[in-house]
Amino acid sequence: MNGYRQIFKSTALIGGTQVVKILIGVIRTKVLAVLLGPSGIGLEGMYQAATSLVGTLTGFGIGNSGVRQIAEAVGTEDRRTITRTVRTLRFTSLVSGLLGMVLVLVLCVPLTKATFGNETYIFGVALMSLTLLFNSVSTGQTALLQGMRRLKDLATCEVLGALFGTIAGIIFIYIWGVRGVAPYLVAVSAFTILASWWYAKKVKVEVVRMSLKEVSAEVRSLLGMGAAFMTSGLLVAGVAYVTRVLISRHLGMDAVGLYGATWTLSTVYVGIILNAMGADFYPRLTAVADDNKMVNLLVNEQTEMGVLMAIPGVLGTLTLAPWVLRVFYSPAFAPAVVIIRWQLLGIALRVVGWPMGFVQIAKGMPRLFMLTQVVFSAVQVGLLFFCLRLWGLEGIGISYLIMYVFHTLAIFGVCRSISGFSWSRRSLLVIACSIVATISVLLTVRFLPLLEATIVGLTITSAVSVISMISLQKLLDIDIRRMIALKFGRTRS
């Protein structure tokens, strides 16, 4: 199987689950938008931003490091080693969850004041402490399933958790209105832990005695590997928190809801592709980290595949943004269109820079990785602050675009310095064409009347989609039309 086929296969396998989860999330968000409006969506985002910051700090990167630890243990084929690693992962996940829950309860008052400016929502913040416990334990259980490559179990538990959590959450919102936002979030995390526990308990391990020294060694290894991931996650959560607080202070809670809606819609399609590809790309890149020629080859392959698969979705969302906001949310979210248009241009650049971001960790450079994450986070917050003051609501999207122009150029420079990386001629062609197409659609929807802009935008999107499909067909070395013809031929027979 060539590299392109392997990327495509893993993306299709893992991405399918993400699609189902997103569809469930869309239904959940639609109900919330209709029942609560932008302020309700904004309150949901504020709750999550406030507590996820603590959760990331006390989570110690266990989700990412746990997958790697389990996979390495399984590779040894030593049952005792596997058992020690599994037990350590479960124990550490529980302890970190309890620590996060207690920390939120202790800091409940100052955390609420810092987030909302008063103590109105203190009960909701306190209740959200349960989500840290549930999410931490669930993260350990899903890391176990992924590390042991029980991908079907992992996919099923994620879908079931999202489905039943959504049903329970909608009931809470319907009964209690805005007071049900915190209980709804707790319900979602509760059903997630139940579903992951049901499938994780199928993993049978031997009962072995572990000395304190063995436990200490396993925990140090787990937490040591998770330090870089924790720092990155903490910065992401911190930026999300500060972003919502800045928007709330400058423009009010409704603007936070508008931002939350555009963030979800602008990243949903691309997020599926990047998350799915990352599950396979990172371990493959790590395996050849000492071979710069192979590293550069894999990054170029990943860039081409990522852009070709992502750009049709970016263009389609950019064209249909006014309609999508109405369908998935409500007419009250129409002002958010000025944010999402700029965000999507930044998203296109994010796809370009995403594969290069793995090179530092794959080469075992956690300090460099953490340093770049600190710089990017500081730049993002600074840009948001100034753009909000200059352009108001539209400045949210503009700051995101400027940020990813800086990010793409900076991460390219970093990768070039540590691996001699350069884009191949084919990668540059794919990147350039995608950027030109995105700018063309952006100009179209910005300056033409809505109907004409939609028609022209969809025409460009359709043309780019056909070109992308043809390009993918060549890279994958398959005949898509013949496959479709055979499929329909068998159906008719």
Image: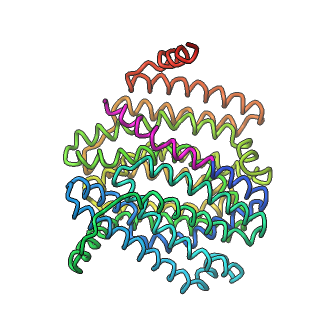
Q: Image quadrant of residue 5?
A: top left
Which one is in front, 391 or 329?
329
Instruction: Please say which color scheme the image uses.
Output: rainbow
Corner quadrant of residue 375: bottom left
In the displayed structure, 348 sits above or below 38; it is above
Location of the N terminus by quadrant is top left
Of 227 and 491, the residue lying toward us: 491
Total numbered labels: 0
Percent of width and height locating residue 493: 55, 13
Please indicate whether residue 113 sits to the left or right of residue 254 in the image.
left
In front of the other: 384 or 13? 13
- Residue at image coords 57%, 56%: 399
Query: What range is drawn magenta here?
Result: 1-23
- Relative to 429, say whether 489 is above or below: above
Q: Is residue 276 above or below residue 257?
A: above
Magenta segment, prevailing SS (helix, strand or loop): helix
> For residue 112, which quarter of the picture?
bottom right
**Which residue is depicted at the point 41% across and 70% down?**
93
Q: Position of residue 45 (x, y in %)?
A: 63, 65
As for residue 18 lying within the magenta part, the answer is: yes
Q: Residue at x 72, y 37 (%)?
A: 447
Spot occupied by residue 47 in the image (x, y as percentages of width and height): 62, 70
Q: Magenta includes 129?
A: no
**Left or right side of 97 for 300:** left
